[in-house]
Amino acid sequence: MTTGCIVAPLGFQAGSTYCGIKIAKDSLDLGIIFSAYPSTGAALFTTNQIYAAPVKLSRKIIQKGMGCVRAFVINSGNANACTGEQGYKDAAEMVSTAAACLKISEDELLIASTGIIGRPLPMEKITAGIQTAVNSLGNTQAHGDAMARAIMTTDTKQKSVAIRIKINGKEVSVGGIAKGAGMIAPNLATMLCFLTTDVSMPAELLSECLRNSAESSFNRITIDGHMSTNDTIAIIANGASGVTIAEKNNDLRTFQQGLDYVTSTLAKAIVMDGEGATKFVQIDVIGARSRNEATRIARSIADSPLVKTALNGEDPNWGRIVSAAGYAGVELDESKTTLYINDILIFAKGMPAQCDLNTLSASMKNKDIMIRLELGLGNYRDTVWTCDLSHEYVTINAEYHT
């Protein structure tokens, strides 16, 4: 996905380099996103209680700086997680080095890391890499594409998107990049994602928009139910378009829709690039008593290894789906429960439904699979996006050594 890029909004630049963190010398492993203008920022972080040094430090920076953020510095290949006091010192050194090179305050810069857990950062290489990345800053599509590649680990595709929307007759942009293919589970961030926009907005309002977008996109995906130690979503708004949004009004709603489009596009791209994935799966749970109950059931189905392996085998195994719904901890009425796969009725009122098995089997060969479970209990619904579980997923993670 290369429609637009992180530097599409006015006033943003990106620079990337290979500094030697990763083994593959033809890869990129460090990048910087920078706003040429004073900006506000907001960020969300993993809710895992075991979290990496860059998460700990960036949390402090975003609180201390009152949302004044102008740059992101990200390395891949090393998570700087479970690295003790030295890991925190290394994270702080990354901040101080980048701030000095960019000539901004250390309180205006957030950092993130992704990769193998438990290894110390090669700080001599990273320090040199930061200087190189700063010297290579630019605002072309090539700069944006390189930045998207620099944050990848087991990803097979870069994930980048940008859109233009009109607010008050003026054109504004929202851009984003993300990485993630494994260790993907809902509940706040679930991967790395960096967003830029050329509107001006108070940090508190920007934070609310970011939370809303995360809830409707990144909190709706799961690949393996495993939450990372390094999950981070962050956004910078620099006002370079001349558009200011300072209150909740129609302008804010328009911006929220644009941001939601970017985050949902990136979220779906993560699922499509799931480690070893061959299927993109949408699970809709309809007719629940509450949205929370719909969410619990959808996630229970999405995280079931038996459901996911059946989908990989292109087997419409409805028994695995309904049983996963049944152990979600939500009271169900089997006689009201109806299941569709690819819009084909397969289970109704506690019994298998009569359907054209040849048509159903043929539809299971599609790359996109739709599962719709209707509960008949209320008026609430939710959607979760996931993928299948393949032999390749096991191979990738068995060979991903510390």
Image (spheres, rainbow, N blue to C red):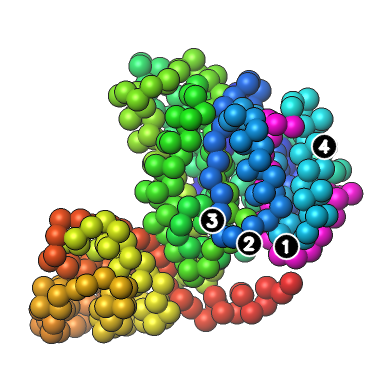
Dot 4 or dot 2: first in sequence order is 2
**Residue underneath mark 1:** 82
Packing grade of label 4 (10 A; few <14, some 14-19, many >=20) is some
Circle 4 SS class: helix
Q: How far apart are marks 4 and 3 (CA)?
A: 28 Å
Residue 99 falls inside the magenta stretch: no
Circles 1 and 2 in contact, beta carbons < 8 Å: yes
Q: On residue 50, which mark appears?
A: 2
Q: Is residue 32 visible?
A: yes
Q: In the rendered view, tell whether residue 293 sits above or below residue 400.
A: above
Dot 1 or dot 2: first in sequence order is 2
Q: Which amino acid does label 2 sit on?
A: Ile
Q: Which of 163 and 384 is in front in this view?
A: 384
Q: What residue type is labelled 1?
A: Cys
Q: Distance between the residues labelled 1 and 2?
A: 8 Å
Q: Identify the residue at image location x=74%, y=57%.
A: 80
